[in-house]
Amino acid sequence: MASDMQSAPRSRPASPFDVPIFRAVWIASLVSNFGAMIQSVGAAWMMTSLTSSPKMVALVQASTVLPFMLLALWAGAMADNLDRRKVMLVAQGFMLCVSAVLALFAWEGWLTPWLLLAFTFLIGCGTTIGGPAWQASVGDIVSREQLPSAVALNSMGFNTARTAGPAIGGAIVATAGAAVAFLINTLSYVGLILVLLRWQRPQTPRLLPREGLFMAMGAGLRYVAMSPNLRIVVGRAMAFGLAANAVSALMPLVARDLVKGGALTYGLLLGSFGIGAVVGGLSSGPARRHLSTERIVRLSTFALAAGTAITAVSPSIVLTIAALMLAGFSWVLALSTFNISVQLASPRWVVARGLSVYQMAAFGGMAVGAWVLGMVADGHGVAAGLLVSAAFLTVTILLGFVMPLPQVDDLNLTPLSQWQEPQVAVPLEPRSGPVVVTIEYRIEAHNIVAFLSAMTERRRIRRRDGAHGWTLLRDLNEPELWVERYHVATWHDYIRHNQRRTHADAENSAELQQLQKDGMPLRVHRMIERQTGSLPSARRHEPVTVDAQMNDPTRTA
């Protein structure tokens, strides 16, 4: 009995909050998010005192999200290749220093509109660097089944701060000034830094050296470009982002010009948006259980358009508050749905880069949209800018009929872990290359159409995982003989290429194995290119060839 109890598998925590490190980082992040909201209120309201230009006010929001467009992929490559805890620590420390200098400049009265934008841009850079590392770490901390809940909790934590933070920030700015708001934001980073310093993150043994930073960035872009699911999610997120940020970007002007209020009113409006966002975060789980991903985004986009339009034409602050709650609810529900889809559609080795490309698209769209809508508001008024945003959001709903979002909940993207590095007859260095691989298939005439269809998918998988120069050849003298050929830069790249294969890819390998002529094994040749006259010994000019026969449909060459 005792032995049976000891061997029984442990049940998984019912909630991500049952995982201690997730709970600790979430709480510390909540405090930091409160500081960020207070800082954003101080920056936006200070800009209204430094200039009367709606374009400059809108650029405060744009300067915060612009770093996502510029640095997200670089940050994701670092998060996938370096210790994510250390990346988060560097980001938090950087933001603490920038916020402290901003508080000093505000206290001394040294700020100008463009200098304020520079500080908010630098703080946005810190957020961009730390964000992918934490979001990718969530999938390592909690189970795949808990991941949607964990993502929703992160969104809820951010928007909980967004609910009360702006009201608190407005009160602080009104009574003590923006410099005090910036100082409070500086102090809010301390708790998260202490939690990260105490976190003993398990180290996964690294069997291969890290990819170079630019190679890792290229691999991330290539993976997204060659993954139809991710490509659709990123494209839809970019379209959504172009108009989704109008309410947030123009909120100070809504408070000042449409509602005729001050800093406290601005904080109240932001708090209303945040209340709706918290409810939206809490609704993510139930919505996913009852609605498809596409239906959630369509309804959210329509609701955001309605909330934005009502805000533009509202005759009373009560109706404006209700409209902003609706806008906040739909805004966070749509973004959390995009985020969850990206995480579920990305294997762990590239998840931070997948999230980075998504953020680069979504927040880059927000930055461009905030700038354009600021110009519209500058020339035609705040209400006109909001109505243009609502109209464009309505148009993006039509994209769902052309590019419907995929259902990725059941994708199994864990590594196959069945491939083993082959033994070679000639010694190789890890950086030896280029490596050329050919695989011989024997396909009967009645299976050619199915074979070509399967090879189309095989080509996508090969290129997605790092292969170059992929070709499919047919022997003119032996019509049944087909040869798949591709190359990779080095032997290490060849190993990486094969280790990236997932369970979701095994179906393609099994299909090709079934199409193979009975009794004929797949034959693999692994060769390394050599240039004539480049080596001192004639014997070293000979090509290195390793033949292998493959009978296991889950193994890849």
Image: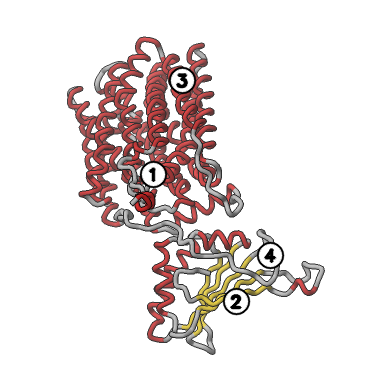
**Which of these two is toward me, 386 or 169?**
169
Which mark, by number, is residue 142?
1
**Residue 529 position in % (x across, y down):** 67, 69
Mark 3 or 2, which is nearer the eye? Answer: 2
Image side of residue 274 versus residue 480, left or right? left
Q: Which mark is residue 187?
A: 3
In contact (CB < 8 Å): disc 3 and disc 1: no
Q: Residue 428 carries which label?
A: 4
CB within 8 Å, label 1 to label 4: no
The amino acid on which the numbered mark 1 sits, given as a three-letter code, is Val
> Image quarter for residue 161?
top left
Judge left or right: residue 395 versus residue 456.
left
Name which quarter of the figure residue 43 lies in: top left
For marks 1 and 4, give the CA distance: 39 Å
Other-residue count near label 4 (Cα within 10 Å), few / some / many at <14 / 14–19 / ≥20: few
The quarter holding residue 541 reads: bottom right
| Label 1 vs 2, first from the N-terminus | 1
Question: Gap between marks 3 and 1, in whole Å?
Answer: 29 Å
Which residue bears the numbered disc 2? Answer: 547
Identify the amino acid type marked 4.
Answer: Leu
For discs 3 and 4, the disc positioned in front in the rendered view: 4
What residue appears at the point 59 percent right and 50 percent down from the top-left corner?
210
Which structural element holds mark 2? Answer: strand
The one of 1 and 56 positioned closer to us in this rendering = 1
Label 3, secondary structure: give it: helix
Q: How far from the left and from the top, in percent, is residue 446?
A: 38, 85
Question: Do the CB atoms of the residues marked 3 and 2 lie less than 8 Å apart?
Answer: no
